[in-house]
Image (spheres, rainbow, N blue to C red):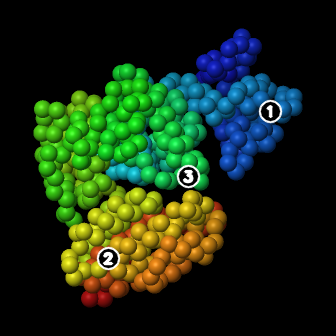
Amino acid sequence: MKQTLNKLVKGFIAANGDIPATPIKDIRLHSNNVEPGDLYIAVHGTAADGHDYIPEALENGASAIITNGRDVGTLPVPQVKVSNPRKAASYVAAEYYGHPSTELHMVGITGTNGKTSTATLIRSILNKAGCKTAQLGTLGVIAEDHEQGKTLTTMDAINLQKLLRDLSDDDFTHVVMEVSSHAIHQYRVADVEFDTTVFTNLTPEHLDYHGTMEDYYNAKAKLFKSLPLSATAVVNSNDKYGSRLINESTAPVIKTSVTNNSDVQFKDVSISLSGIKGTIIAGEHEIEIDSSLVGHFNAENILSAVGAALAMGIPIGTIADGINHCKVVSGRMETLTAPNGAPVVVDYAHTPDAYEKVLNTVYNLIPKDGKLITVFGCGGNRDASNRPLMGRLVEQFSNHFYITPDNPRYEKQDDIVNDIVKGLSTDHYDVINDRGVALKQALVSLNSNDVLVVLGKGRENYQEIDGIRQPYSDIDIVEEFCANSATRS
Protein backbone atom coordinates (compact mmCIF):
# COMPACT_ATOMS: atom_id res chain seq x y z
CA MET A 1 0.00 0.00 0.00
CA LYS A 2 1.38 3.39 -0.97
CA GLN A 3 0.87 6.02 1.68
CA THR A 4 2.50 9.28 2.69
CA LEU A 5 3.22 10.62 6.15
CA ASN A 6 1.08 13.75 5.82
CA LYS A 7 -2.00 11.74 4.81
CA LEU A 8 -1.55 9.19 7.58
CA VAL A 9 -1.43 11.79 10.37
CA LYS A 10 -3.94 14.28 8.97
CA GLY A 11 -6.62 13.19 11.42
CA PHE A 12 -4.73 14.19 14.57
CA ILE A 13 -2.16 16.78 13.46
CA ALA A 14 -3.75 20.19 13.01
CA ALA A 15 -0.82 21.76 11.17
CA ASN A 16 -1.01 19.20 8.39
CA GLY A 17 0.76 21.54 5.99
CA ASP A 18 3.95 21.28 8.03
CA ILE A 19 4.11 17.49 7.65
CA PRO A 20 6.03 16.38 4.56
CA ALA A 21 4.61 13.90 2.06
CA THR A 22 7.27 11.33 2.94
CA PRO A 23 6.46 7.96 1.33
CA ILE A 24 5.65 5.28 3.94
CA LYS A 25 6.26 1.64 3.08
CA ASP A 26 4.94 0.11 6.33
CA ILE A 27 4.28 0.90 10.00
CA ARG A 28 6.28 -0.59 12.85
CA LEU A 29 6.14 -0.58 16.65
CA HIS A 30 9.34 -2.61 17.09
CA SER A 31 12.63 -1.11 15.96
CA ASN A 32 14.19 -4.47 15.08
CA ASN A 33 11.41 -5.04 12.51
CA VAL A 34 11.91 -1.71 10.76
CA GLU A 35 12.88 -1.84 7.11
CA PRO A 36 13.89 0.99 4.75
CA GLY A 37 10.95 3.34 4.16
CA ASP A 38 8.97 2.36 7.28
CA LEU A 39 7.28 4.64 9.79
CA TYR A 40 8.45 3.85 13.35
CA ILE A 41 6.10 4.69 16.22
CA ALA A 42 7.88 4.94 19.57
CA VAL A 43 5.62 3.62 22.33
CA HIS A 44 6.41 3.67 26.03
CA GLY A 45 5.63 0.08 27.10
CA THR A 46 5.55 -1.67 30.47
CA ALA A 47 8.98 -3.27 30.01
CA ALA A 48 10.74 -0.84 27.66
CA ASP A 49 10.44 2.61 26.12
CA GLY A 50 10.35 2.63 22.33
CA HIS A 51 12.01 6.05 22.31
CA ASP A 52 15.22 4.40 23.46
CA TYR A 53 15.25 2.37 20.26
CA ILE A 54 14.91 5.23 17.81
CA PRO A 55 18.63 4.98 16.84
CA GLU A 56 18.11 1.32 15.89
CA ALA A 57 14.99 2.20 13.88
CA LEU A 58 16.94 4.88 12.00
CA GLU A 59 19.83 2.52 11.40
CA ASN A 60 17.36 0.03 9.90
CA GLY A 61 16.06 2.67 7.49
CA ALA A 62 13.04 4.33 9.12
CA SER A 63 11.79 7.19 6.94
CA ALA A 64 9.80 8.92 9.71
CA ILE A 65 9.29 8.73 13.49
CA ILE A 66 6.26 9.37 15.71
CA THR A 67 7.16 10.25 19.32
CA ASN A 68 5.47 11.53 22.48
CA GLY A 69 7.41 14.80 22.25
CA ARG A 70 10.27 13.61 24.41
CA ASP A 71 13.58 15.24 23.51
CA VAL A 72 15.29 12.72 21.27
CA GLY A 73 17.64 15.22 19.66
CA THR A 74 17.77 16.24 16.02
CA LEU A 75 16.65 13.48 13.70
CA PRO A 76 17.61 13.00 10.04
CA VAL A 77 14.00 12.12 9.16
CA PRO A 78 10.65 13.82 9.88
CA GLN A 79 9.47 13.56 13.50
CA VAL A 80 5.77 13.84 14.37
CA LYS A 81 5.15 14.67 18.03
CA VAL A 82 1.88 13.48 19.60
CA SER A 83 0.52 13.27 23.14
CA ASN A 84 -0.28 9.58 22.92
CA PRO A 85 1.72 7.38 20.49
CA ARG A 86 -0.47 4.33 21.26
CA LYS A 87 -3.57 6.19 20.15
CA ALA A 88 -1.70 7.53 17.15
CA ALA A 89 -0.65 3.99 16.21
CA SER A 90 -4.31 2.91 16.16
CA TYR A 91 -5.38 5.82 13.95
CA VAL A 92 -2.41 5.59 11.58
CA ALA A 93 -2.89 1.83 11.17
CA ALA A 94 -6.59 2.20 10.38
CA GLU A 95 -5.79 4.96 7.88
CA TYR A 96 -2.95 2.98 6.30
CA TYR A 97 -5.14 -0.09 5.75
CA GLY A 98 -8.21 1.87 4.63
CA HIS A 99 -10.38 1.48 7.75
CA PRO A 100 -11.28 -2.17 7.05
CA SER A 101 -13.62 -2.50 10.04
CA THR A 102 -16.13 -0.31 8.19
CA GLU A 103 -16.34 -3.03 5.52
CA LEU A 104 -17.09 -5.78 8.07
CA HIS A 105 -19.79 -6.35 10.67
CA MET A 106 -17.69 -6.17 13.82
CA VAL A 107 -18.89 -7.93 16.98
CA GLY A 108 -16.87 -7.04 20.08
CA ILE A 109 -17.19 -9.10 23.26
CA THR A 110 -15.78 -7.96 26.58
CA GLY A 111 -16.06 -9.07 30.20
CA THR A 112 -13.98 -11.01 32.70
CA ASN A 113 -15.34 -14.46 31.87
CA GLY A 114 -17.29 -15.98 28.99
CA LYS A 115 -15.75 -14.04 26.10
CA THR A 116 -14.46 -17.06 24.19
CA SER A 117 -17.55 -19.18 24.75
CA THR A 118 -19.87 -16.36 23.69
CA ALA A 119 -17.71 -15.62 20.64
CA THR A 120 -17.76 -19.29 19.62
CA LEU A 121 -21.55 -19.44 19.96
CA ILE A 122 -22.01 -16.29 17.87
CA ARG A 123 -19.67 -17.61 15.18
CA SER A 124 -21.68 -20.86 15.08
CA ILE A 125 -24.91 -18.89 14.60
CA LEU A 126 -23.40 -16.72 11.87
CA ASN A 127 -22.03 -19.76 10.07
CA LYS A 128 -25.53 -21.30 10.11
CA ALA A 129 -26.79 -18.01 8.63
CA GLY A 130 -24.34 -18.42 5.74
CA CYS A 131 -22.09 -15.54 6.80
CA LYS A 132 -18.36 -15.87 6.18
CA THR A 133 -17.17 -15.29 9.73
CA ALA A 134 -13.82 -15.02 11.49
CA GLN A 135 -13.31 -15.35 15.26
CA LEU A 136 -10.43 -13.57 17.02
CA GLY A 137 -9.33 -14.05 20.60
CA THR A 138 -7.81 -16.44 23.08
CA LEU A 139 -8.05 -19.36 20.64
CA GLY A 140 -6.15 -17.35 18.02
CA VAL A 141 -7.68 -16.67 14.63
CA ILE A 142 -10.40 -19.04 13.45
CA ALA A 143 -11.20 -18.23 9.85
CA GLU A 144 -12.06 -20.94 7.35
CA ASP A 145 -10.08 -20.87 4.09
CA HIS A 146 -8.01 -17.94 5.36
CA GLU A 147 -4.26 -18.15 5.12
CA GLN A 148 -3.25 -18.39 8.77
CA GLY A 149 0.27 -17.24 8.00
CA LYS A 150 -1.14 -13.75 7.57
CA THR A 151 -2.25 -13.55 11.19
CA LEU A 152 -0.89 -13.18 14.70
CA THR A 153 -2.59 -14.52 17.82
CA THR A 154 -1.79 -11.54 20.04
CA MET A 155 -2.25 -8.37 18.04
CA ASP A 156 -1.26 -4.77 18.53
CA ALA A 157 -3.24 -2.06 16.76
CA ILE A 158 -1.22 -2.34 13.58
CA ASN A 159 -1.42 -6.10 13.16
CA LEU A 160 -5.12 -6.02 14.03
CA GLN A 161 -5.88 -3.53 11.27
CA LYS A 162 -3.75 -5.55 8.84
CA LEU A 163 -5.68 -8.70 9.76
CA LEU A 164 -9.03 -6.96 9.27
CA ARG A 165 -7.86 -5.76 5.86
CA ASP A 166 -6.83 -9.31 4.92
CA LEU A 167 -10.18 -10.70 6.08
CA SER A 168 -12.17 -8.09 4.17
CA ASP A 169 -10.10 -8.73 1.04
CA ASP A 170 -10.80 -12.46 1.46
CA ASP A 171 -14.55 -11.71 1.38
CA PHE A 172 -15.26 -12.25 5.07
CA THR A 173 -18.39 -10.36 6.12
CA HIS A 174 -18.39 -10.75 9.93
CA VAL A 175 -15.70 -10.70 12.61
CA VAL A 176 -16.44 -11.84 16.16
CA MET A 177 -13.70 -10.51 18.41
CA GLU A 178 -12.85 -10.85 22.09
CA VAL A 179 -11.88 -7.43 23.45
CA SER A 180 -9.76 -7.41 26.59
CA SER A 181 -9.50 -4.51 29.02
CA HIS A 182 -5.82 -4.24 28.09
CA ALA A 183 -6.73 -3.88 24.41
CA ILE A 184 -9.18 -1.10 25.22
CA HIS A 185 -6.88 0.71 27.65
CA GLN A 186 -3.92 0.51 25.27
CA TYR A 187 -5.98 1.85 22.33
CA ARG A 188 -5.53 -1.33 20.26
CA VAL A 189 -9.20 -1.19 19.21
CA ALA A 190 -9.66 2.58 19.32
CA ASP A 191 -10.22 2.73 15.56
CA VAL A 192 -12.20 -0.47 15.15
CA GLU A 193 -15.80 0.47 14.40
CA PHE A 194 -17.96 -2.06 16.24
CA ASP A 195 -21.53 -2.71 15.12
CA THR A 196 -22.51 -5.06 17.96
CA THR A 197 -20.91 -5.23 21.41
CA VAL A 198 -21.48 -7.73 24.23
CA PHE A 199 -20.79 -7.39 27.96
CA THR A 200 -20.68 -10.73 29.82
CA ASN A 201 -19.72 -9.89 33.43
CA LEU A 202 -17.08 -8.22 35.58
CA THR A 203 -15.25 -9.83 38.50
CA PRO A 204 -11.83 -9.11 40.05
CA GLU A 205 -9.02 -9.73 37.57
CA HIS A 206 -6.07 -7.77 36.15
CA LEU A 207 -6.07 -5.52 39.22
CA ASP A 208 -2.27 -5.72 39.11
CA TYR A 209 -2.65 -3.71 35.88
CA HIS A 210 -5.76 -1.58 36.49
CA GLY A 211 -5.33 -1.02 40.23
CA THR A 212 -8.99 -0.90 41.26
CA MET A 213 -12.29 -2.44 40.17
CA GLU A 214 -13.51 1.03 39.26
CA ASP A 215 -10.60 1.54 36.84
CA TYR A 216 -11.12 -1.99 35.50
CA TYR A 217 -14.81 -1.26 34.91
CA ASN A 218 -14.03 2.07 33.25
CA ALA A 219 -11.66 0.33 30.83
CA LYS A 220 -14.41 -2.10 29.83
CA ALA A 221 -17.10 0.58 29.75
CA LYS A 222 -15.07 2.70 27.34
CA LEU A 223 -16.02 0.26 24.59
CA PHE A 224 -19.72 1.06 25.13
CA LYS A 225 -19.38 4.78 25.69
CA SER A 226 -18.14 5.48 22.16
CA LEU A 227 -20.70 3.49 20.16
CA PRO A 228 -22.80 5.20 17.47
CA LEU A 229 -26.59 5.06 17.66
CA SER A 230 -26.54 2.62 14.75
CA ALA A 231 -24.75 0.02 16.91
CA THR A 232 -26.31 -2.28 19.51
CA ALA A 233 -25.00 -3.22 22.96
CA VAL A 234 -25.94 -6.59 24.48
CA VAL A 235 -25.54 -6.48 28.26
CA ASN A 236 -25.90 -9.11 30.98
CA SER A 237 -28.19 -7.21 33.35
CA ASN A 238 -27.79 -9.90 36.01
CA ASP A 239 -24.27 -8.56 36.63
CA LYS A 240 -24.11 -5.48 38.87
CA TYR A 241 -21.64 -3.77 36.53
CA GLY A 242 -23.83 -4.71 33.60
CA SER A 243 -26.79 -2.97 35.24
CA ARG A 244 -24.65 0.13 35.54
CA LEU A 245 -23.43 -0.12 31.96
CA ILE A 246 -26.98 -0.19 30.60
CA ASN A 247 -27.36 3.46 31.58
CA GLU A 248 -23.96 4.49 30.23
CA SER A 249 -24.02 2.92 26.78
CA THR A 250 -24.27 5.42 23.92
CA ALA A 251 -26.01 2.79 21.77
CA PRO A 252 -29.37 1.02 22.26
CA VAL A 253 -29.14 -1.91 24.68
CA ILE A 254 -30.53 -5.45 24.58
CA LYS A 255 -30.64 -6.77 28.15
CA THR A 256 -30.10 -10.45 28.94
CA SER A 257 -30.51 -12.34 32.20
CA VAL A 258 -30.97 -15.90 33.40
CA THR A 259 -32.83 -14.88 36.55
CA ASN A 260 -34.42 -11.46 35.94
CA ASN A 261 -37.11 -10.22 33.58
CA SER A 262 -35.17 -9.00 30.59
CA ASP A 263 -35.27 -8.58 26.81
CA VAL A 264 -33.75 -12.04 26.36
CA GLN A 265 -34.34 -14.58 29.13
CA PHE A 266 -35.03 -18.23 29.84
CA LYS A 267 -38.66 -19.20 30.23
CA ASP A 268 -37.44 -22.52 31.61
CA VAL A 269 -34.01 -24.16 31.76
CA SER A 270 -32.50 -27.49 32.83
CA ILE A 271 -28.73 -27.78 33.38
CA SER A 272 -26.88 -31.09 33.73
CA LEU A 273 -23.52 -32.65 32.85
CA SER A 274 -25.07 -33.59 29.51
CA GLY A 275 -25.92 -29.99 28.62
CA ILE A 276 -28.45 -27.14 28.78
CA LYS A 277 -32.08 -27.50 27.68
CA GLY A 278 -34.77 -24.87 27.84
CA THR A 279 -36.82 -22.19 26.14
CA ILE A 280 -35.59 -18.65 25.61
CA ILE A 281 -38.08 -15.80 25.37
CA ALA A 282 -37.07 -12.86 23.18
CA GLY A 283 -39.97 -10.47 22.81
CA GLU A 284 -42.74 -12.41 21.09
CA HIS A 285 -40.37 -15.15 20.01
CA GLU A 286 -39.48 -18.43 21.71
CA ILE A 287 -36.22 -20.27 20.98
CA GLU A 288 -35.85 -23.93 21.92
CA ILE A 289 -32.35 -24.69 23.22
CA ASP A 290 -30.75 -28.15 23.42
CA SER A 291 -27.06 -27.41 23.92
CA SER A 292 -24.20 -29.72 24.89
CA LEU A 293 -22.56 -26.87 26.80
CA VAL A 294 -22.54 -27.25 30.58
CA GLY A 295 -23.10 -24.88 33.49
CA HIS A 296 -25.17 -21.89 34.61
CA PHE A 297 -22.51 -19.54 33.24
CA ASN A 298 -22.90 -21.09 29.77
CA ALA A 299 -26.63 -20.42 30.03
CA GLU A 300 -25.65 -16.75 30.43
CA ASN A 301 -23.28 -17.00 27.46
CA ILE A 302 -26.05 -18.53 25.33
CA LEU A 303 -28.35 -15.60 26.17
CA SER A 304 -25.59 -13.14 25.20
CA ALA A 305 -25.10 -14.92 21.89
CA VAL A 306 -28.86 -14.91 21.23
CA GLY A 307 -29.02 -11.18 22.01
CA ALA A 308 -26.18 -10.45 19.59
CA ALA A 309 -27.77 -12.57 16.87
CA LEU A 310 -31.10 -10.78 17.29
CA ALA A 311 -29.29 -7.45 17.02
CA MET A 312 -27.91 -8.63 13.68
CA GLY A 313 -31.35 -9.64 12.43
CA ILE A 314 -30.70 -13.38 12.22
CA PRO A 315 -33.87 -15.54 12.01
CA ILE A 316 -35.00 -17.37 15.14
CA GLY A 317 -34.66 -20.84 13.62
CA THR A 318 -31.09 -20.11 12.52
CA ILE A 319 -30.20 -18.86 15.99
CA ALA A 320 -31.46 -22.10 17.54
CA ASP A 321 -29.53 -24.20 14.99
CA GLY A 322 -26.34 -22.26 15.69
CA ILE A 323 -26.63 -22.66 19.45
CA ASN A 324 -27.59 -26.34 19.35
CA HIS A 325 -24.88 -27.31 16.87
CA CYS A 326 -22.10 -25.63 18.85
CA LYS A 327 -21.00 -28.88 20.49
CA VAL A 328 -17.99 -27.75 22.50
CA VAL A 329 -16.08 -24.57 23.13
CA SER A 330 -12.43 -25.56 22.98
CA GLY A 331 -10.84 -25.50 26.43
CA ARG A 332 -14.04 -24.39 28.18
CA MET A 333 -15.73 -27.10 30.24
CA GLU A 334 -14.27 -29.48 27.66
CA THR A 335 -15.03 -33.01 28.84
CA LEU A 336 -12.79 -35.98 28.08
CA THR A 337 -13.27 -39.51 29.40
CA ALA A 338 -10.74 -41.44 31.46
CA PRO A 339 -10.23 -45.15 30.63
CA ASN A 340 -12.57 -46.19 33.47
CA GLY A 341 -15.31 -43.83 32.27
CA ALA A 342 -14.69 -41.00 34.74
CA PRO A 343 -15.22 -37.51 33.26
CA VAL A 344 -12.19 -35.22 32.99
CA VAL A 345 -13.23 -31.57 32.69
CA VAL A 346 -10.61 -29.20 31.28
CA ASP A 347 -11.32 -25.50 31.65
CA TYR A 348 -9.42 -22.27 31.05
CA ALA A 349 -10.75 -20.75 34.31
CA HIS A 350 -8.09 -18.56 35.91
CA THR A 351 -10.06 -16.15 38.12
CA PRO A 352 -11.88 -16.72 41.44
CA ASP A 353 -15.24 -16.13 39.79
CA ALA A 354 -14.54 -18.63 37.01
CA TYR A 355 -13.23 -21.16 39.55
CA GLU A 356 -16.40 -20.91 41.59
CA LYS A 357 -18.64 -21.27 38.54
CA VAL A 358 -16.85 -24.33 37.17
CA LEU A 359 -16.35 -26.11 40.49
CA ASN A 360 -19.86 -25.40 41.76
CA THR A 361 -21.34 -26.67 38.50
CA VAL A 362 -19.38 -29.94 38.58
CA TYR A 363 -19.83 -30.42 42.34
CA ASN A 364 -23.61 -30.32 42.02
CA LEU A 365 -23.65 -32.79 39.15
CA ILE A 366 -21.35 -35.61 40.30
CA PRO A 367 -22.80 -38.90 41.66
CA LYS A 368 -23.35 -39.08 45.43
CA ASP A 369 -20.61 -41.68 45.88
CA GLY A 370 -18.18 -39.82 43.62
CA LYS A 371 -15.32 -37.49 44.51
CA LEU A 372 -14.20 -34.25 42.91
CA ILE A 373 -10.44 -34.06 42.30
CA THR A 374 -8.86 -30.85 41.04
CA VAL A 375 -5.55 -29.93 39.42
CA PHE A 376 -4.77 -26.20 39.37
CA GLY A 377 -2.19 -23.47 39.83
CA CYS A 378 -2.00 -19.68 39.74
CA GLY A 379 -0.20 -17.58 37.15
CA GLY A 380 2.97 -15.72 38.00
CA ASN A 381 3.29 -11.93 37.82
CA ARG A 382 -0.47 -11.56 38.20
CA ASP A 383 -2.69 -10.37 41.05
CA ALA A 384 -1.27 -12.32 44.01
CA SER A 385 -4.23 -11.41 46.25
CA ASN A 386 -6.41 -13.82 44.23
CA ARG A 387 -4.25 -16.84 45.04
CA PRO A 388 -5.44 -17.64 48.60
CA LEU A 389 -9.05 -17.14 47.46
CA MET A 390 -8.61 -19.51 44.53
CA GLY A 391 -7.01 -22.09 46.82
CA ARG A 392 -9.90 -21.74 49.27
CA LEU A 393 -12.45 -22.25 46.49
CA VAL A 394 -10.70 -25.39 45.26
CA GLU A 395 -10.54 -26.71 48.83
CA GLN A 396 -14.24 -25.94 49.38
CA PHE A 397 -15.42 -28.09 46.48
CA SER A 398 -12.71 -30.77 46.15
CA ASN A 399 -12.15 -34.02 48.03
CA HIS A 400 -8.51 -33.84 47.02
CA PHE A 401 -6.48 -31.46 44.87
CA TYR A 402 -3.05 -30.91 43.37
CA ILE A 403 -1.27 -27.53 43.36
CA THR A 404 0.89 -27.24 40.23
CA PRO A 405 2.51 -24.60 37.99
CA ASP A 406 0.30 -22.55 35.66
CA ASN A 407 2.54 -20.16 33.74
CA PRO A 408 4.75 -19.01 36.65
CA ARG A 409 6.43 -16.58 34.25
CA TYR A 410 9.19 -14.77 36.13
CA GLU A 411 8.04 -15.71 39.65
CA LYS A 412 9.35 -18.59 41.73
CA GLN A 413 6.80 -21.40 41.83
CA ASP A 414 7.39 -21.89 45.57
CA ASP A 415 6.32 -18.29 46.21
CA ILE A 416 3.11 -18.81 44.24
CA VAL A 417 2.37 -22.02 46.15
CA ASN A 418 2.94 -20.28 49.47
CA ASP A 419 0.37 -17.63 48.52
CA ILE A 420 -2.17 -20.33 47.60
CA VAL A 421 -1.60 -22.28 50.81
CA LYS A 422 -2.38 -19.18 52.90
CA GLY A 423 -6.04 -19.68 51.99
CA LEU A 424 -6.20 -23.35 52.98
CA SER A 425 -7.40 -24.92 56.22
CA THR A 426 -6.94 -28.64 55.44
CA ASP A 427 -4.18 -30.89 54.13
CA HIS A 428 -6.23 -32.60 51.42
CA TYR A 429 -3.73 -31.68 48.75
CA ASP A 430 -0.37 -32.42 47.18
CA VAL A 431 2.11 -29.90 45.83
CA ILE A 432 3.80 -31.18 42.66
CA ASN A 433 5.98 -28.74 40.74
CA ASP A 434 5.66 -30.65 37.47
CA ARG A 435 2.15 -30.15 36.09
CA GLY A 436 2.31 -33.19 33.84
CA VAL A 437 3.31 -35.44 36.73
CA ALA A 438 0.50 -34.02 38.89
CA LEU A 439 -2.09 -34.55 36.16
CA LYS A 440 -1.00 -38.16 35.57
CA GLN A 441 -1.10 -38.87 39.31
CA ALA A 442 -4.63 -37.44 39.48
CA LEU A 443 -5.70 -39.58 36.53
CA VAL A 444 -4.32 -42.73 38.17
CA SER A 445 -6.28 -41.97 41.36
CA LEU A 446 -9.66 -41.61 39.61
CA ASN A 447 -12.50 -44.02 40.33
CA SER A 448 -15.28 -44.43 37.78
CA ASN A 449 -17.73 -42.25 39.76
CA ASP A 450 -15.21 -39.46 40.32
CA VAL A 451 -14.75 -36.30 38.28
CA LEU A 452 -11.35 -34.70 37.62
CA VAL A 453 -11.33 -30.95 37.00
CA VAL A 454 -8.21 -29.41 35.45
CA LEU A 455 -8.22 -25.62 35.74
CA GLY A 456 -6.23 -22.78 34.27
CA LYS A 457 -4.85 -23.69 30.87
CA GLY A 458 -7.68 -25.05 28.75
CA ARG A 459 -6.26 -25.57 25.26
CA GLU A 460 -3.04 -23.66 25.90
CA ASN A 461 -0.10 -25.58 24.45
CA TYR A 462 2.69 -24.08 26.52
CA GLN A 463 3.97 -23.49 30.03
CA GLU A 464 5.61 -20.06 30.44
CA ILE A 465 8.64 -20.26 32.74
CA ASP A 466 11.26 -17.50 33.07
CA GLY A 467 9.83 -15.81 30.00
CA ILE A 468 10.19 -18.92 27.82
CA ARG A 469 7.13 -20.76 26.48
CA GLN A 470 7.87 -24.45 26.86
CA PRO A 471 5.65 -26.98 25.03
CA TYR A 472 2.94 -28.35 27.34
CA SER A 473 -0.73 -29.32 27.01
CA ASP A 474 -3.20 -30.63 29.61
CA ILE A 475 -5.29 -32.08 26.78
CA ASP A 476 -2.30 -33.94 25.33
CA ILE A 477 -1.42 -35.39 28.75
CA VAL A 478 -4.96 -36.72 29.25
CA GLU A 479 -5.23 -38.12 25.73
CA GLU A 480 -1.79 -39.76 25.97
CA PHE A 481 -2.72 -41.31 29.33
CA CYS A 482 -5.93 -42.73 27.85
CA ALA A 483 -4.14 -44.07 24.77
CA ASN A 484 -1.45 -45.77 26.87
CA SER A 485 -4.09 -47.29 29.14
CA ALA A 486 -5.91 -48.70 26.12
CA THR A 487 -2.66 -50.20 24.82
CA ARG A 488 -1.91 -51.83 28.19
CA SER A 489 -5.38 -53.34 28.40
| Image position of 182 (left or right of 139) | right
The Cα–Cα distance between marks 1 and 2, rounded to whole angstroms, is 57 Å
The outermost residue toward the top is 17
Q: Secondary structure at mark 2?
A: strand
Percent coordinates x, y for residue 32 in the rendering? 71, 45
Q: Which mark's residue is nearer the viewer, 2 or 3?
A: 3
Q: Are marks 1 and 2 in contact (CB under 8 Å)?
A: no
Residue at left 27%, top 59%?
295
Circle 1 residue: 70
The percent coordinates of residue 246 (x first, y second) are 37, 33
Q: Which residue is mark 2?
A: 372
Relative to 408, is 332 on the left or the right?
Answer: left
Question: Label 3 sits on what residue type?
Answer: Leu
Q: Residue at x 74, y 31 (%)?
A: 67
**415, 69: nearer the viewer:** 415
Q: Quadrant of the C terminus?
A: bottom left
